Image (cartoon, grey):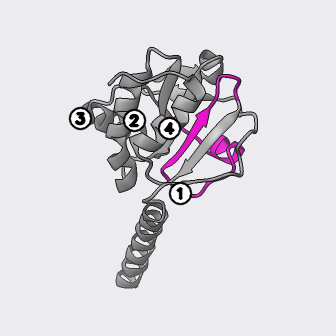
Amino acid sequence: MKQSNHRWNEIFWMSLVGLSLCLCLRSSKASEVQTQIGKKAPTWELVGLDGKSVSSSKYEGKIVVLNFWATWCPPCRAEIPDFMKLHDDYKDKDVVVLGISLDSGLGPVKRFVRTQKLNYPVLMGNGKLVDELGNFSAVPQTFIIDDEGRIHTQFQGLVKFEALEKKLKALTYTEIKQ
């Protein structure tokens, strides 16, 4: 009996890991999604890695790039250098890059951010915000919100710097530093 329960437990966890991997790998190449474009972005209050609350109102009047990701997701990890470059190139142009982790715990996220030396703010996401942004089922997901608080662009899957830059140039009307 004990052997049988152990086997079912093993099958359950392997299935859960497999499902998570499928959801993540399914989104390994970015595609633009149109369902949320033009809608007012939801307001939110999330927790930063320091445990303090951060509200979307802090970023009113700025262009905000929200990147939903997880430490266990290979495409999410692969696109982080592009978000770091984006942050460096646009931080003086009223553009804010925010990483929204969908990990279940704070510990792995803090370790990842520290070891990878992320240069932009990371917040802990929640199901409420995911629901309000169209209830997406896979990561990475990236939203570009214009300075009036409307969703300008939504990328599903791994997005490259060039695609992000093209969208931001349209919103900022400025050349990025070379």
Disc 2 element: helix
Residue 17 image point, x, y percent: 41, 66
Up-down relation of residue 108 to residue 75 (above or below): above
**Do the residues bearing badges 1 and 2 touch, measured as CB atoms within 8 Å?**
no
- Give the mark, 4 or 3, whose residue is nearer the N terminus: 3
What span is colored magenta in the figure?
Answer: 124-149
**Do the residues bearing badges 4 and 1 touch, measured as CB atoms within 8 Å?**
no
Image mark for residue 138: 1
Q: Nearer the viewer, residue 136 or 79?
A: 79
Image mark for residue 166: 4
Q: Nearer the viewer, mark 4 or mark 2?
A: 4
Q: Nearer the viewer, mark 1 or mark 2?
A: 2
Q: Amino acid at mark 1?
A: Ala
Q: Amino acid at mark 3?
A: Thr
- In the figure, residue 171 lies in which quadrant? top right
CA distance separating discs 3 and 1: 25 Å
CA distance separating discs 4 and 3: 29 Å
- Give the mark, 4 or 2, whose residue is nearer the N terminus: 2
Image mark for residue 147: none
- Give the mark, 4 or 1, whose residue is nearer the N terminus: 1
Q: In this rendering, does residue 57 appear at all?
A: yes
Q: Nearer the viewer, residue 58 or 142?
A: 142
Q: Is residue 85 magenta?
A: no
CA distance separating discs 3 and 2: 16 Å
Disc 1 element: loop
CA distance separating discs 1 and 2: 18 Å
User: How packed is label 1: few (under 14 Cα within 10 Å), some, or many (20 or more)?
Assistant: many
Residue 154 image point, x, y percent: 60, 45
- Give the mark, 3 or 2, whose residue is nearer the N terminus: 2
